[in-house]
């Protein structure tokens, strides 16, 4: 695996890029209809569904007939009893997974960029869960977390601890899924951090060493500020992933027990399953707006900090 | 105002969607049995439950033996709401198999039968159906399906050995039932087995209580469809309250949140628990897994307040339907197959493939003598006329979130009254989607 990403410019902002003189707009050597195949694919699979979903969110729709009902679906969706739990759970889930991925990912990246034995092998091991299918991970952990018979509680039992009921206890269900998500996703964060850390020029560390900086100071004054682009990438990716998380939750708890681990996406999916196509489309429009409303300002904030650096 | 005009997407888009669906349909669990050239191949979609699959394969083989030029290819789909979704999508894209199995009653009403299914009213076998089944696969004057599999009971399976040992009587009222539970608990046995890892099983205390609701108010289903009575009111709220009572008394098995119904029925057979509120279809699985203990299990309807009106709630069998997309030779073959399934010979074939969970809905068909004891108990209820069809066969209104709500009530996360009120809200969406009056 190529973690030896050498190009600092891949992670650092392109401030040093040679400034192009204000040229006249060069005419592209290719005719515009070269864009057509891409435009058709983009249009059919992205633009048309997006705009038709805005339309169908205003209807009561059974796939063959529709009835225009104005904003009723949105009103209904916001009255959905599971929605408040879903919203709260989505935010909790996104914040927990994002935080843990950033913190653990950074710690692992520090470990895996230091001079340790079998570094390459360990880097692969950390990354492997990312490659496994999410549903597979979910089902595996469902078996591992079975309260009396699962491996985790049996192992805890050996050392005399009675493990929690993990997925079937409403208090721990969401947390259990979030921890599984972190286990699966931390590898990706680690790889991005490793790329960020190895791209920091050696000279800084040498200078710090000759000034007698401690390991913590090196981390706090050099690694952390200079890998900020990598950190913002990880935060954005992990947060978006957490906000639209669905597959792992569905595989492990289906939003249960009851409604206790429902997130917005699973609330929407249940409406779809029940055949309330208009209502679920309205839910998706809401989710789209919500993710945009959270991520867009955050992205602006993080990239601005990056430029000021 | 309901716009009846069908939405016609741009042809290009339709073609692309069709291609994608065709591709995905190809991969969807087709179970071998390739076309051996010549003759007609009839594709047949069933849910992947053992009972459905074994019966479908048994019927297919028997039918092929009688009609060598027709090849029946059984395909499977998931059950539950995931399966509902597949059926709806395949019907509305014209990608449905030549014949398919799907629920009768409220779920049947939700697949838009008039638009999607071939009417079968004038088929010769239509007169042979039990009257009680016909309305569950009919819209207006047209009949759209034939019964496949047997009817089943929803109620309490109990361990007769435990009853004998503790000297208990089959309860006729809820109070007697709870008194029995207290004695069972005192003897160190779990009074009530529940299996919430299969969330659907949590609904039984509410659904199987319907006989008692209908006994208290025979017009309840009609009023309910019209939006005049609610689950949060008496008498229907009692089902939720009974579920809550069982939980509050601590009568459930310790691992009720994490086991599936297969484990539950095994615990019942082994005498670790005394009662299991479930559909009698699970007996078939037990008959295969543990034939020694199958006759230790008996059945009684969920008791209500009035011993004189004691009875059981029963579930009609699913229907076998032909979608409008089946045409020509396929349609002929499909009708022949449905006629075979809806014959006495067809029910005999089914009984051989999988033990019946209750009576068949074809006039003149008999159950084999070796059916499990609990099925005999159920048949006794039917013969005495002390049964009521479950609500989903008398009203198209059934909310999708009932199983989550009953898990919450049954786990003590939500009160019975709150759960019932929440279910009334859930149901409203379904009623509106169906365009019923009285739910605006």
Image: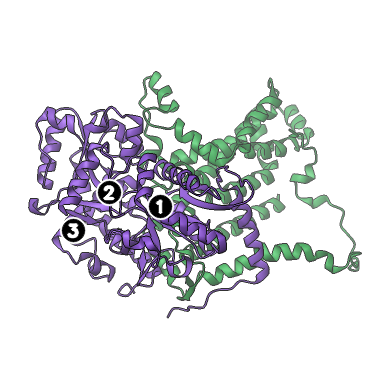
Chain colours: A green, B purple
Residue B220 circle label:
none
Give the x, y percent position of residue B203: 29, 49
Q: Which residue shows up at 88% across the image and 59% down it?
A: A20
Chain bearing mark 2: B
Give the x, y percent position of residue B419: 27, 55
Q: Work out which quarter of the rendered image holds the C terminus of chain B and state it.
A: bottom left
Chain bearing mark 1: B
Kindly state the secondary structure of the residue where label 3 is placed: helix
Q: Which residue shows up at 55% across the image and 64% down it?
A: B327
Above or below, B399 against A156 in this view is below
User: Mark 2, mark 3: which one is toward the viewer?
Assistant: 2
Q: Looking at the image, is mark 1 or mark 3 earlier in the sequence? A: 3
Q: Relative to residue B120, is residue B407 drawn left or right? A: left
Give the x, y percent position of residue A101: 57, 40
Residue denoted by label 2: B359
Q: Are marks 1 and 3 on the same chain?
A: yes
Q: Looking at the image, is mark 1 or mark 2 earlier in the sequence? A: 1
Q: Looking at the image, is mark 2 or mark 3 earlier in the sequence? A: 3
Residue denoted by label 1: B341
């Amino acid at each position: 695996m190529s973690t030896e990403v050498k190009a600092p410019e891949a992670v650092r902002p392109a401030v040093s890029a040679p400034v192009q003189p204000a040229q006249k707009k060069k005419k592209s050597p290719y005719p515009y209809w070269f864009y057509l195949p891409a435009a058709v694919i983009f249009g059919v699979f992205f633009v048309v569904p997006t705009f038709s979903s805005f339309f169908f969110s205003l209807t009561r729709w059974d796939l063959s007939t529709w009835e225009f009902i104005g904003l009723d679906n949105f009103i209904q969706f916001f009255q959905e009893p599971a929605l408040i739990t879903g919203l709260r759970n989505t935010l909790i889930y996104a914040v927990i997974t994002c935080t843990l991925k950033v913190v653990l990912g950074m710690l692992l990246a520090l470990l895996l960029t230091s001079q340790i034995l079998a570094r390459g092998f360990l880097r692969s091991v950390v990354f492997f869960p990312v490659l496994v299918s999410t549903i597979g991970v979910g089902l595996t952990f469902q078996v591992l977390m079975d309260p009396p018979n699962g491996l985790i509680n049996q192992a805890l039992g050996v050392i005399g601890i009675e493990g929690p009921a993990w997925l079937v206890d409403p208090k721990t269900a969401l947390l259990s899924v979030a921890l599984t998500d972190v286990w699966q996703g931390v590898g990706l964060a680690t790889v991005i951090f490793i790329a960020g850390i190895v791209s920091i020029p050696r000279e800084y560390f040498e200078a710090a060493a000759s000034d007698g900086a401690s390991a913590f100071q090196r981390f706090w004054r050099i690694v952390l500020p200079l890998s900020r682009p990598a950190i913002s990438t990880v935060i954005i990716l992990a947060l978006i992933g957490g906000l639209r998380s669905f597959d792992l939750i569905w595989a492990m708890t289906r939003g249960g027990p009851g409604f206790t681990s429902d997130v917005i996406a699973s609330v929407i999916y249940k409406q779809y399953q029940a055949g309330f196509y208009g209502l679920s489309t309205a839910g998706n429009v809401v989710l789209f707006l919500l993710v945009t409303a959270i991520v867009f300002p955050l992205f602006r904030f993080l990239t601005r900090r990056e430029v000021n650096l | 105002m309901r716009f009846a005009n069908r939405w016609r997407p741009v042809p290009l888009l339709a073609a692309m969607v069709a291609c994608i669906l065709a591709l995905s349909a190809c991969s969807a669990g087709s179970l071998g049995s390739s076309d051996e050239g010549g003759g007609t191949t009839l594709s047949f979609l069933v849910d992947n439950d053992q009972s459905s699959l074994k019966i479908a394969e048994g019927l297919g083989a028997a039918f092929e033996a009688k009609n060598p030029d027709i090849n029946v290819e059984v395909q499977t789909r998931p059950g539950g709401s995931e399966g509902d979704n597949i059926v709806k999508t395949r019907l509305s894209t014209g990608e449905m198999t030549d014949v398919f199995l799907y629920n009768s009653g409220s779920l049947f009403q939700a697949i838009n039968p008039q638009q999607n299914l071939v009417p079968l009213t004038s088929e010769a076998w239509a007169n042979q159906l039990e009257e009680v089944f016909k309305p569950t696969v009919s819209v207006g004057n047209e009949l759209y399906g034939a019964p496949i599999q047997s009817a089943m009971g929803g109620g309490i399976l109990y361990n007769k050995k435990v009853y004998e040992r503790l000297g208990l009587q089959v309860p006729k009222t809820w109070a007697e039932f709870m008194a029995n539970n207290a004695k069972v608990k005192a003897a160190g046995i779990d009074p009530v087995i529940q299996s919430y890892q299969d969330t659907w099983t949590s609904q039984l205390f509410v659904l199987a209580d319907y006989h008692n609701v209908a006994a208290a108010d025979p017009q309840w289903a009609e009023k309910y469809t019209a939006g005049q009575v609610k689950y949060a009111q008496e008498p229907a709220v009692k089902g939720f309250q009974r579920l809550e009572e069982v939980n509050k008394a601590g009568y459930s098995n310790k691992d009720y949140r994490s086991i599936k119904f297969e484990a539950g029925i095994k615990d019942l057979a082994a005498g670790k628990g005394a009662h299991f509120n479930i559909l009698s279809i699970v007996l078939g699985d037990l008959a295969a897994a543990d034939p020694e203990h199958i006759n230790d299990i008996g059945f009684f309807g969920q008791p209500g307040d009035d011993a004189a009106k004691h009875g059981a709630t029963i579930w009609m069998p699913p229907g076998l339907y032909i979608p409008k997309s089946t045409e020509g030779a396929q349609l002929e073959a499909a009708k022949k197959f449905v006629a075979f399934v809806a014959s006495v010979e067809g029910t005999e074939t089914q009984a051989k493939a999988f033990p019946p969970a209750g009576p068949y809905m074809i006039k003149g068909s008999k159950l084999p003598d070796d059916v499990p004891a609990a099925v005999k108990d159920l048949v006794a209820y039917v013969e005495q006329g002390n049964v009521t069809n479950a609500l989903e066969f008398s009203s198209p209104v059934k909310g999708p979130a009932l199983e989550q709500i009953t898990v919450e009530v049954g786990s003590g996360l939500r009160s019975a009254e709150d759960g019932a009120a929440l279910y009334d809200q859930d149901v409203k969406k379904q009623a509106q989607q169906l365009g019923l009056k009285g739910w605006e």
